[in-house]
């Protein structure tokens, strides 16, 4: 057939699908391609134009739209001739130019690989680069035509091409449901990759062909007779199983050719779904169905939208065969997959939007496609979310690496090796120097520039730039290791600052018994290791020192309790001694000794809160022992005027319990007063148990606070400091 004859067929195919198609535009594409490829020849010796015409024609046969057919015609022009993409856009419009550009870009993906993981990455990259489903359809058809004419290239090229096809293209065709192309590609690959096995299987099948064809045609005519009786118009054929799948089954299931069940298969194609079930009934009446082998993919379509009825029957002479029953529309979907879906939309007068034609839609479709019929295929099923979250780029060796979207050349460098990352000084992307924060794009070729100069290393800023956790942790590791001295210094400073802030000394909290558990938890052998991580920022100084500080506080509290007990014991001893020596003071609780009374109940009054050092006086209450007041307490002054229940008391020696005192502050109205007071109390290392503020009529602020102290000195110091607060006019002990 001449090229012109082939072109005429192409035209009829286009018009069959779309009678209003712009044939003039197609003609232009044909002319342009013919001219552009004029001095090129295929390996077969034919003029090159044979190839684009064949590709366009196959696309038209799949009922693809005119844009796809024309893009098929032009698919090799931009890459292989002087034609530019701008030219294509000017003559044929953006849509067609976009498709041609997409196919051209895919050519730059080096497709050979030996590792399965790499193949998977390559397929993903392929899909994510072809931003329009039609680009992949063109690419698959292009590959199919090249595989059909593979006999003209040398054996090495045959094997390379066939392997590439089997690794990249047939899995893609499978996922896109393009079964017809997939099978033909697989058989062609099988033929070139395993010529002996292919020849042997072909021979075996041919030996049986006559017998089988006779058998099948017998079955078909029996069925046809029944369908005619029922007035059903149907297309029947014996379904040729493709060789590669028989071969795979024989190997994976370890079966002989005879044992491959559905080797004998027929297909019935009718117009309506209703008719499918009618045909099923007729066939089941005619032959005995094998239980458990019936599958209704019409009611329950496969996730790739494949629909058909499958049943296996015992045919004449007890030979089983499989029947597939489907409508014409289902047939188209079964053969052309995604391409058929897409056309289906167009048929329904659906105005295909840009997004529909973009991969998004395919991705959604594929997302639901989990073909559990075949476990190994299932494993290959794309995880679609990877597409938007990941970019695929090449190493200088052509290896594909996957990164989270937004990754940079730094991520790339660390994925090769820590040493590459640590010594990197720059990056080339597609041959051009790019900044380190350049965002990698799928299909980029990345090359890292390193320096062997000593003292080189990552910058701390990189931690904010990188996206992959691998790079992050490797950069951190470097800082931990390489900048150890610096980190240790930094860590020591941070700890010092924190100690200062807490108002404690190094010796008070940095105690070995408290530090050891921390080191053990981190598997550190020395405090330097700890300073290292603190300086590096993995552990905060606040947290570390804070934990030691709380140990310290706990110890202080214990000490206080111990001191209190000691003081009580001392007071008791003193009182006993006093009793023996005839001293008239008895011992009481609270570190106060009551004159003439032993072990009587003593309470420090809450109205004036006396503390050791205060001048005090006792008041004998009714039934509640002796309450101790400051001599200047306004309450006691009034009490003493009544009956004579006053009694002399004095502070016991070496009292070290804690006392609550109340302090009154008078100040000019100030917004920071409360804060200043609280801070002053904290600065004195005292703890506050209450604070109250109110305003006087003449607009002074009065603040009462209760503070726990152990000695009178502490109180005096606090009062002095509060007095220094700005706006404070008076400070003193206050009473309730
Ligand atoms: Mn081509």
Image (tube, helix red, strand yellow):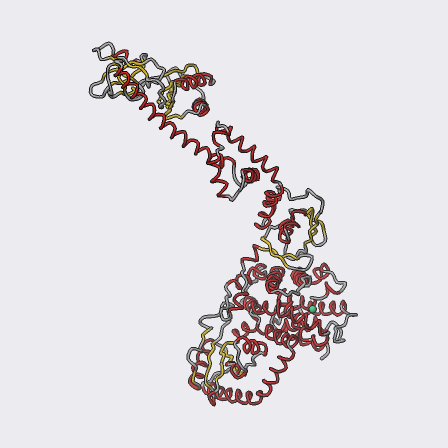
Residue 722 vs 481, above or below: the answer is above
- Tally of numbered discs: 0
Instruction: Point out residue 196 in the picture as x, y percentages from the top left corner.
Output: 64, 80
Please name the residue shown 57% across and 55% down the image. 388
> Viewer-proximal residue, 511 or 483?
511
Residue 577 vs 469, above or below: the answer is above
Residue 671 appears in the picture as rendered:
no
Task: Please state, as top left, top right, bottom left or bottom right, where the C terminus lies in the image.
Answer: top left
Name the residue furthest front. Answer: 580
Residue 533 vs 660, above or below: the answer is below
> Viewer-proximal residue, 243 or 482?
482
Horizontal arrangement in the rendering, residue 28 relative to residue 181 (left or right): right
Tell me the quarter of the picture where residue 587 sits: top left
Residue 481 vs 376, above or below: the answer is above
Residue 463 appears in the picture as rendered:
yes
Tell me the quarter of the picture where residue 580 sits: top left
Name the residue furthest right. Answer: 39
Horizontal arrangement in the rendering, residue 736 relative to residue 358 (left or right): left
Task: Please state, as top left, top right, bottom left or bottom right, where the N terminus lies in the image.
Answer: bottom right
Horizontal arrangement in the rendering, residue 508 relative to residue 478 (left or right): left
Question: Ligand 1 is found in which quarter of the picture?
Answer: bottom right
Instruction: Point out residue 381 in the picture as x, y percentages from the top left corner.
Output: 54, 64
Instruction: Point out residue 448 in the picture as x, y percentages from the top left corner.
Output: 69, 51
Instruction: Point out residue 521 in the picture as x, y percentages from the top left corner.
Output: 48, 43
Tell me the quarter of the picture where residue 362 sits: bottom right
């Amino acid at each position: 057939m001449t090229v012109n004859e082939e072109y005429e067929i192409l035209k009829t195919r286009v018009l069959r699908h779309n009678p209003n198609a712009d044939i003039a535009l197609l003609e232009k594409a044909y002319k342009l391609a013919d001219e552009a490829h004029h001095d090129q020849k295929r390996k077969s010796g034919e003029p090159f134009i044979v190839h684009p015409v064949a590709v366009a024609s196959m696309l038209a046969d799949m009922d693809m739209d005119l844009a796809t057919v024309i893009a098929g015609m032009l698919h090799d022009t931009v890459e292989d001739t002087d034609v530019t993409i701008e030219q294509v856009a000017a003559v044929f419009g953006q849509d067609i130019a976009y498709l041609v550009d997409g196919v051209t870009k895919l050519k730059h993906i080096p497709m050979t690989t030996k590792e399965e993981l790499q193949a998977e990455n390559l397929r993903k990259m392929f899909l994510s680069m072809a931003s329009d489903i039609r680009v992949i359809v063109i690419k698959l058809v292009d590959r199919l035509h090249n595989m059909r004419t593979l006999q003209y290239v040398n054996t090495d090229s045959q094997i390379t091409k066939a392997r590439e096809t089997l690794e990249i293209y047939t899995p893609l065709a499978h996922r896109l449901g393009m079964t017809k192309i997939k099978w033909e590609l697989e058989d062609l690959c099988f033929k070139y990759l395993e010529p002996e096995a292919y020849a042997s299987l072909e021979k075996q099948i041919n030996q049986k062909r006559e017998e089988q064809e006779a058998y099948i045609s017998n079955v078909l005519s029996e069925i046809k007779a029944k369908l005619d009786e029922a007035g059903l118009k149907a297309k029947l054929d014996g379904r040729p199983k493709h060789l590669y799948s028989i071969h795979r089954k024989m190997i994976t299931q370890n079966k002989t050719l005879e044992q491959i069940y559905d080797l004998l298969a027929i297909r019935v194609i009718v117009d309506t779904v209703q008719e499918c079930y009618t045909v099923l009934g007729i066939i089941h009446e005619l032959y005995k169905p094998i239980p458990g082998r019936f599958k209704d993919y019409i009611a329950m379509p496969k996730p790739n939208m494949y629909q058909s009825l499958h049943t296996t029957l015992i045919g004449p002479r007890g030979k089983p065969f499989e029947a597939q029953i489907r409508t014409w529309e289902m047939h188209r979907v079964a053969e052309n997959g995604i391409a058929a879906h897409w056309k289906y939309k167009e048929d329904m007068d659906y105005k295909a939007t840009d997004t529909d034609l973009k991969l998004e839609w395919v991705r959604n479709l594929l997302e639901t496609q989990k073909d559990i019929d075949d476990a190994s295929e299932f494993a290959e099923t794309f995880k679609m979310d990877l597409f938007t979250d990941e970019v695929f780029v090449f190493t200088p060796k052509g290896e594909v690496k996957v990164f989270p979207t937004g990754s940079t050349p730094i991520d790339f460098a660390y994925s090769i090796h820590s040493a590459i990352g640590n010594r990197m000084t720059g990056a080339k992307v597609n041959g051009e120097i790019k900044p380190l924060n350049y965002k990698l794009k799928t299909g980029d070729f990345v090359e890292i520039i390193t320096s062997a100069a000593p003292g080189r290393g990552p910058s701390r800023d990189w931690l904010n730039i990188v996206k992959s956790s691998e790079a992050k942790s490797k950069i951190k590791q470097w800082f931990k290791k390489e900048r150890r001295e610096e980190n240790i210094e930094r860590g020591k400073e941070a700890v010092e600052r924190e100690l200062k802030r807490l108002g404690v000394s190094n010796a008070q909290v940095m105690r070995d018994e408290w530090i050891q558990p921390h080191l053990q938890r981190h598997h550190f052998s020395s405090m330097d290791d700890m300073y290292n991580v603190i300086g590096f920022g993995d552990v905060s100084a606040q947290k570390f020192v804070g934990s030691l500080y709380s140990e310290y506080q706990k110890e202080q509290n214990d000490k206080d309790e111990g001191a209190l007990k000691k003081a009580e014991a001392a007071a008791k001893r003193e009182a006993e001694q006093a009793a023996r020596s005839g001293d008239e003071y008895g011992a009481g609780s609270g570190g106060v000794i009551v004159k003439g009374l032993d072990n009587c109940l003593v309470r420090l009054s809450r109205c004036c809160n006396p503390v050791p050092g205060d001048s005090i006086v006792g008041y004998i209450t009714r039934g509640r022992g002796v309450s101790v007041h400051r001599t200047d307490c306004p309450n006691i002054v009034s009490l003493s005027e009544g009956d004579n229940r006053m009694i002399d008391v004095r502070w016991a020696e070496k009292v070290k319990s804690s006392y609550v005192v109340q302090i009154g502050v008078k100040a000019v109205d100030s917004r920071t007063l409360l804060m200043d007071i609280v801070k002053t109390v904290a600065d004195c290392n005292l703890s506050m148990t209450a604070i109250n503020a109110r305003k006087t009529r003449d607009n002074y602020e009065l603040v009462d606070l209760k503070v726990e102290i152990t000695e009178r000195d502490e109180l005096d110091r606090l009062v002095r400091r509060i007095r220094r607060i700005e706006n404070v006019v008076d400070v003193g002990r206050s009473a309730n």
